[in-house]
């Protein structure tokens, strides 16, 4: 099919348009007479762009030579023909995809970023943690503990008694665990990656039996065994590294590392790490034949002390209804017989004196 149309031709040498009579063989070629010569532009050698109602045709090897068709109907017919001939420039194609395409693209990009944060970063940080030697945990944990020591009141006598209590429990780990008591009304406890487990006197005063205390220590010990702090550090560094690559700021990575290392006692564990620490604690209670009710009772105590302000321990070890229910599930699924442990009770009473 052939269309004829008036058009403006720019020869690329001057900015002055020449009026030409265009013959367009749809899906095939554009021809016109210029300075007594018949010029032939084949569809595969040209590209079509539409700006509003004006259709521009340019040669791929010489972008300065342009034909402009201003008649809207003709422009549209030729453009549609070009489109089916796949001769459109790629960005014109994208423009033609319309809002649906953009929405899809937007959702895809967001999904990709989410996947990165949900799957890839945790996976990478897991691998990075595997490569890092335990001495890394020891070092950052110790640095953090030295800082805490200088600003807190460590009760050496109570720390010794807590250590004696803990020595009666098999935590099923090669890591050496150190137990410390800080004199502070705050209801708090935390684990540092070097194996230090700190319990505040404010929390000690609330636990009522050795089972609850064992459940608490088992939970903290599992955070250390499974290197949760190091994994969080690796995650925030991985996250920051990606942002830095995009933004081009590398110094920030070191700042992130330094900031997080200074705040090891304030790292907030994710739901999955909390659940894993509860599972680990449950296994420790079972192995030591300690009544697992202690775990649920501990949660109850923490929930109850929530009357005026949120206890500090809940901000770093978020306690959810899920977690409480899960501890019940663990008990139901994994029953075992426990026995009274007079030695543990004695060590507990000694601590509570
Ligand atoms: Zn925790």
Image: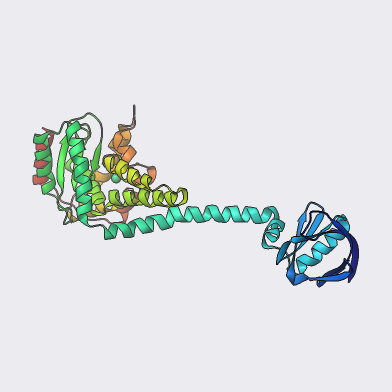
Q: Quadrant of residue 155?
A: top left
Q: Residue at x 26, y 45 (%)?
A: 295
- Image coords of residue 73 (percent x, y): 88, 57
Q: Quadrant of residue 105?
A: bottom right
Please tell me whether residue 270 is drawn above or below residue 57 in the rendered image: above
In this picture, residue 114 sits left or right of residue 260:
right
**Looking at the image, which residue is at 18% across and 48% down?**
195
> Looking at the rendering, in which quadrant would you find the C terminus?
top left
Q: Position of residue 270 (x, y in %)?
A: 36, 47
Residue 294 can be seen, yes or no: yes
Lateral position of residue 315 relative to residue 190, left or right: right
The answer to which of 270 and 302 lies nearer the viewer is 270
Q: Position of residue 230 (x, y in %)?
A: 28, 51
**Ligand 1 placement by image quarter:** top left
Q: Along the horizontal axis of the image, is 79 left or right of 286? A: right
Residue located at (15% from left, 48% from top): 177
Looking at the figure, which quarter contains the N terminus?
Answer: bottom right
The correct choice, above or below, for 199 with respect to 31 in the image is above
Where residue 238 appears, as percent x and y from the top left, is: 38, 52
Vertically, is 64 above or below 300? below
């Amino acid at each position: 099919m052939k269309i004829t149309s008036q058009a403006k031709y720019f020869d690329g040498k001057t900015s002055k348009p020449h009026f030409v009579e265009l013959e367009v063989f749809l899906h095939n070629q554009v021809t016109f007479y210029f300075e007594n010569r018949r010029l032939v532009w084949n569809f595969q050698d040209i590209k079509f762009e539409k700006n509003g109602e004006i259709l521009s045709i340019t040669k791929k090897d010489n972008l300065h030579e342009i034909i402009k068709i201003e008649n809207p109907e003709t422009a549209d017919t030729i453009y549609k023909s070009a489109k089916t001939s796949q001769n459109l420039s790629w960005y014109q194609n994208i423009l033609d995809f319309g809002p649906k395409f953009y929405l899809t693209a937007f959702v895809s990009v967001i999904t990709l970023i989410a996947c990165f944060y949900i799957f890839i970063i945790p996976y990478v940080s897991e691998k990075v943690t595997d490569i890092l030697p335990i001495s890394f945990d020891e070092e950052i944990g110790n640095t953090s503990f030295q800082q805490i020591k200088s600003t807190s009141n460590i009760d050496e006598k109570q720390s010794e008694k807590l250590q004696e209590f803990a020595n009666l429990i098999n935590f099923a780990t090669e890591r050496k665990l150190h137990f410390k008591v800080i004199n502070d009304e705050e209801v708090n406890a935390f684990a540092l990656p070097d194996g230090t487990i700190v319990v505040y006197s404010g929390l000690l005063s609330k636990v009522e039996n050795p089972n609850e205390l064992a459940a608490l220590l088992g939970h903290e010990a599992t955070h250390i065994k499974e290197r949760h702090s190091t994994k969080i550090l690796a995650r925030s560094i991985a996250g920051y590294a990606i942002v830095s690559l995009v933004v081009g700021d590398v110094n920030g990575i070191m700042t992130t590392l330094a900031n997080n290392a200074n705040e090891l006692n304030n790292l907030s564990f994710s739901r999955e790490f909390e659940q894993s620490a509860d599972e680990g604690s449950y296994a420790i209670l079972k192995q030591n034949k300690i009544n697992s009710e202690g775990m649920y009772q501990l949660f109850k105590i923490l929930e109850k002390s929530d009357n005026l302000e949120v206890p500090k321990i809940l901000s770093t070890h978020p306690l959810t209804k899920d977690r409480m229910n899960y501890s019940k599930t663990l008990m139901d699924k994994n029953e075992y017989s426990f026995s009274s442990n007079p030695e543990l009770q004695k060590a507990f009473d000694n601590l509570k004196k």
